[in-house]
Image (cartoon, rainbow, N blue to C red):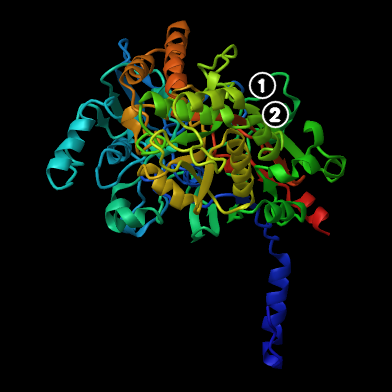
Amino acid sequence: MRCLPALASLAACLIGISAAAQAPAQAPQKTLRYSFLIAETGFDPAQINDLYSSIILGQIFDPPYTYDFLSRPVKVRPNTAAAMPEISADGLTWTIRIKPGIFFTDDPAFKGRKRELTAQDYVYSMKRHADPKIKSQNLYLIQKLVVGLDGLRQAAQKNNGKFEYDREIEGVKAIDRYTYQIKLTEPAPSLLYYLTYCNLTCAVAREVIEAVGIDKAMEHPVGTNAFRLAQWKRSSRIVLERNPGYREDVYAEEAPEGDAVKQAIAAKLKGRRLPMIDRVEVYIVEEPQPRWLAFLNAEHDLITHTPAEFINLAAPNGKLAPNLARAGVQMDRVSELDLAFFYFGMEHPVTGGYTPEKVALRRAIALGFEIETAIRQIYRGQAIAAQSTVPPGSYGFDKTLAGPLAEYSPARAKALLDTYGYIDKDGDGYRENPDGSRLALEIASVPDSQGKLIDEVWRRSMDKIGIRVEYRKGKWPELLRESRSGRLMIWNLGWIAAIPDADPFYQILYGPNAGQSNHSRFNQPEWNRMFEKARLLPDGPERSALFREMDKIFFAYAPMRPMVHRITTGLAHPWVVGYQRHPVLREFWKYVDIDTEILAREKK
């Protein structure tokens, strides 16, 4: 309070000072600050499926189910649902009951009224994936599976794109205000996991989407979860703040026996009201050095992925460095349920096609790629070689499998190329195509330090087998758009699990998913048929046997080369309480706290 000099104001000033002194001190705002290494694309669940946008979505929107944050193996539990789904004996009808009293954050589209979450919101939100105007990147997960949904999409395509949201279909409909039903064309045991996947099954409000339009929906997320978007500077800074109307929710996570760290977290935070922090600031920092320095200098509270370039400083031999341990830094190191791979454009004139010489070229490139060098130089040892698409820890993983595409053999690669006519005809040291035309691989990569390392491994690997490489540089979102439209020849990608099952890691090879999850556009009828059969089966010997047959076809045609499953090392300063990396759940913000006393002490 600023006091006026006039004597007449003295009494009022003293009263003001006394009142201020007696007022309770306001608790300091708890802010979590950290970075993404890749820029977001937007915040509309039906329009995105990249990891970093998905992390933001998971904090704003609510699917009906989620995972216990600490349980290992993973455990599905109700989120906005009142109980686990009721599933008919034939597995075709799933009934989901929503808790009453959950509300969307305020928005002008609601015209001043408090807007409750209802079953119809989940129905509308699932239908959005079938709307041709939206171009959902997750439609493939429910296409041909939800009764009547494909028909609704086809009707819109015949009617200038006009989608009939009010037309009721058997496949997804509200039974009453808080109950909706999903009817399937065939049993799908993995649907339970997809009901936890925010990008596919969370709820948006129809009024908001219609008020702002499809394009603006990417920058105007309105949900029911613990946080809401406060500020956004595209590809630079994203700020979320606590949702003041968030429902009653307390920390009740179940730590596994024998895990002392998780047990201590569960004991410390049990019963706490969620979320425990007030604000989250996310910065896009693509280069590893500034990202690492921001953490070391305590400008960021957390680093979810310690850059490979600095892993030996942070965790030599997998153990937290002594200087960091003395500073109270916490380490969480896990093997990801993910896959890093490079794919071949199967419709590209150089690498695509199913003829013997094209298959031979792709297999030779896979055999000639120096995977151990890649693990050492690109990932700094923080990865394990992939034998197939499926990572360890997923349902459907086979630890006995030794995939032929995982082999490194320049000699075999050169023999294959020689046999099929890829030889050096002009004596310049590089091979030509069988018809004598120039052969060059165009590798797509991002213009950062990691991209340069990948470029160098490619050049060295291909030089050893006599294949020329060139590079197509671009920002990651730009390359992603080109990839989905089938315009890239070769690109290194990562695929991270949305559910703890093999299904997503085979979706990337399923022919009808071209332009969505299937970036290579591989389309082999027998493989597709077996995948369609396998996805109807629960985890077990019959499904595993089908997976092995699918692997044989995949290995034979080589539309992609599985590279590694990554090991991720997360570090948190001592004032961050409760951070653990979940195998598939990206929504961790509401499960962590900031100890302001430790923070104040450390900042002195």
Give the label on residue 14, or none.
Answer: none
Q: Where is the C terminus found, in terms of image quarters? A: bottom right
Q: Where is the N terminus found, in terms of image quarters? A: bottom right
Amino acid at the residue labelled 1: Pro
Q: Position of residue 528 (x, y in %)?
A: 33, 21
Q: Tell me if mark 1 has few (under 14), some (14-19) or many (20+) residues whose alpha carbon lies within 10 angstroms of its own.
A: some
**Mark 1 and mark 2 residues within 8 Å of each other at the beta carbon:** yes
Q: Which residue is mark 2?
A: 262
Q: Earlier in the sequence, mark 1 or mark 2?
A: 1
Camera-nearest residue between 141 and 464:
464
Q: Position of residue 557 (x, y in %)?
A: 42, 23
Q: Tell me if mark 2 has few (under 14), some (14-19) or many (20+) residues whose alpha carbon lies within 10 angstroms of its own.
A: many
Amino acid at the residue labelled 2: Lys
Residue with the most extreme bottom position = 6
Q: Is residue 100 visible?
A: no
* Vertical arrangement, residue 147 with respect to residue 20, above or below: above
Q: Which residue is mark 1?
A: 256
